[in-house]
Amino acid sequence: MISLICIICPVGCDLSVENDAVMGNACPRGAVYALEEARAPKRVVTATCALAEEPPEKSRNLPAVRRVPVKTLSPCPKEQIADLLSDLYRLRVALPVKIGDPVITDWRGTGITVAVSRTLP
């Protein structure tokens, strides 16, 4: 049996999954969440990538930026997160970039796209 706390809504139901049966959910979304978490857990991954070159002079008294934040646009299977992070940490992103620009598309044939989450000139 797997015990979970549902994160789909603010109620936070105590869920348990046993033999594909979900108990404790107050709504159908909780059952879907519990079954997916029990069978194949996935997570949205956030990380940073190094810049290929130094950004222009500091603006608005902000410290020099050397990395750009990125995130997956869809969840990644939990067992593949370490490989994805390894690939992201080796990546060098060229400026300029804007929010939503993809840095990786269809990562290793999984359909996962990783996009920039901060605009840098």
Image: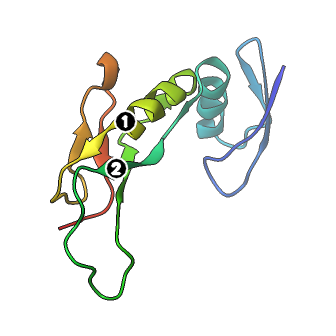
Viewer-closest of 76 and 61: 61
Viewer-closest of 84 and 94: 94
**Residue 87 appears in which quarter of the rendering?**
top left
Give the quarter of the figure containing the C terminus: bottom left
Residue 5 screen position, x and y as percent: 76, 42
Residue at the image position 62 percent from the left and 18 percent from the top: 39
Report which residue position mark 2 lands on. Answer: 50
Residue at the image position 33 percent from the left and 19 percent from the top: 108
Residue at the image position 65 percent from the left and 42 percent from the top: 27
Residue 29 screen position, x and y as percent: 59, 38
Report which residue position mark 1 lands on. Answer: 90
On screen, residue 104 versus residue 48, left or right, reads left
Residue 60 screen position, x and y as percent: 30, 88
The amino acid on which the numbered mark 2 sits, given as a three-letter code, is: Ala
On screen, residue 121 versus residue 107, left or right, reads left
Residue at the image position 37 percent from the left and 36 percent from the top: 90
Residue 117 screen position, x and y as percent: 33, 57
